[in-house]
Image (cartoon, helix red, strand yellow):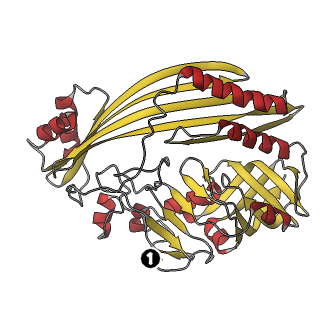
Amino acid sequence: MIVNRLIEKAMEKAQGAQASLGQSESTDVSFENDRLKSAQSSQSTGMSIRIIVDGKLGSSHTTDIDDVDGVVARALEAAEFGSPVHFEFPGPQEGPDVRVYDDAVVPVTKGEMVRIGEEMMTLVKEYNPHILINARTGKSVSSIQFANSSGIAYSTETTNFAVGVGGQWIRGTDILLAGHGFGWKKREIDHVEVARRAIRLFTMAENIAPIKSGDMPVVFTPEGVKVLLLALILGFDGKNVFLGSSPLAGKLGEKIADETFALTDNPLLDYANGSGTYDGEGVPHQVTPLIEGGVVKNFLYDLDTAGRAGTKTTGNGIGCSPTNLVIKEGDTPFEEIVKSTEEGLLVHNVLGLGQGNPISGEFSVNVQLGYKIEKGDIVGRVKDVMLAGNTYDALKNIAVIGDKAEWAGGSLLTPPIQIARLSVVAK
């Protein structure tokens, strides 16, 4: 394998090395403004190496798989000015069994992908012919070869399949953008249901409902829950914890959320986007509870940050990033959450996520697609509305958690969540 050649070449001068070769073939079909825009296939290749020389780390990457000598030489050069290393490359360990490859993805043709897109567009057009529709269908097959100087050597193959449909509905000066999509590592996706979900978002937005500024109950759909997740992703990053920039630093074992709230990093869910047997450093993936009963249980670490912090990696390298974040289901159906709300806001997605001070939990965002709840009914879409608050305060103020978790944003599995009170500002 090429990765073994990379290791052999690097170890002529290095004390440790890790190499990977990734190759991918993908096909994408896209529709724009009611018409087929493109149907194309592409291939990509990337080769990377990380080395340890005299206690310093160097790395290099190339798309030229014949450039073994060059990529190693550049990594050696980078190591001269690299940061100090606080870890050793791990030895072989048996990884968990998780399904990330589906044979049914490979034979899907461009023609079938075009048909899927056309069927989704037709359904939306039957609902409302005035919506200008965009749609997409994509598939990919990827392989990774990995090896290091401590004896790890393996290869994996993964597949991905995704569909989505949405569009814009222009009524005078009002422009409504809505849509729905889903993707994972399996061919099995009900594209008709994807289109129906997009239609439901448009249907709920047919009326425009005025809303007054003030503190009120806010219900986040699974997609909308991402507003609260950004701060948690940054907060549980082991590097931020070690550096002391995370507000969760020093709070291991402390209660930071309502006792009904539980959050887990789970890379072992079959076919989920963030799932796999090993992380990017050859460490077996594992399930890591982050919050249980509102209490902080663990942080996410890669090899280097774990070494600096004097702990063990959680299999989240390189970069301490989460895999699949899973929020525990509650026991209240979404319909009951809405029915029990006298007046409030339903948030589906926002613009400007990341404004404010995300590391501290502060957010101030424009609601891109949100709906007013009045006397237990969703009465229409809100316009020119901002939502402001603090994630950590909101998690202490959870009113209810829905009983059905859904995938949102690819790697988040969450039920809807209602926060008892948040600041809503109407222009």
Kindly identify which residue carries mark 1: 250
Can see residue 131? no
Q: Is residue 18 left or right of residue 129?
A: left
Would you say 415 lies left or right of 234 here?
A: right
Mark 1 neighbour class, 10 Å CA radius: few under 14, some 14 to 19, many 20 or more: few
**Left or right: where 422 falls relative to 75:** right
Query: Which residue is pictured at 19% across the width and 45% down the height?
Result: 80
- Name the residue rendered at 50%, 64% in the picture: 264
Nearest to the observer: residue 281 or residue 382: 281
Which residue is depicted at the point 56% across and 77% down?
293
> Which residue is painted at 45% across and 72% down in the image?
249
Q: Quadrant of residue 288?
A: bottom left
Of residues 203 and 205, which is closer to you in this image?
A: 203
Split into 4 quadrants, where in the image is the N terminus?
A: top left
Which x, y percent locates residue 89? 21, 55
Q: Which of these two is toward me, 296 or 407?
A: 407
Looking at the rendering, which quadrant does residue 377 occupy? bottom right
Q: Is residue 273 above or below residue 401?
A: above
Provide the secondary structure element on which disc 1 rests.
loop
User: For the image shown, how many numbered marks are present on the structure?
Assistant: 1
Expressed as whole percent of the image width and height from the top left, the position of residue 359 reads 54, 61
Q: Position of residue 127 (x, y in %)?
A: 84, 33
- Residue at the far bottom in the pictured view: 254
Where residue 424 appears, x then y in whole percent? 79, 60
354 lies above or below 180: below
Pick out the residue farthest to the left: 12
Visible in this render: residue 238? yes
Residue type beneath disc 1: Gly
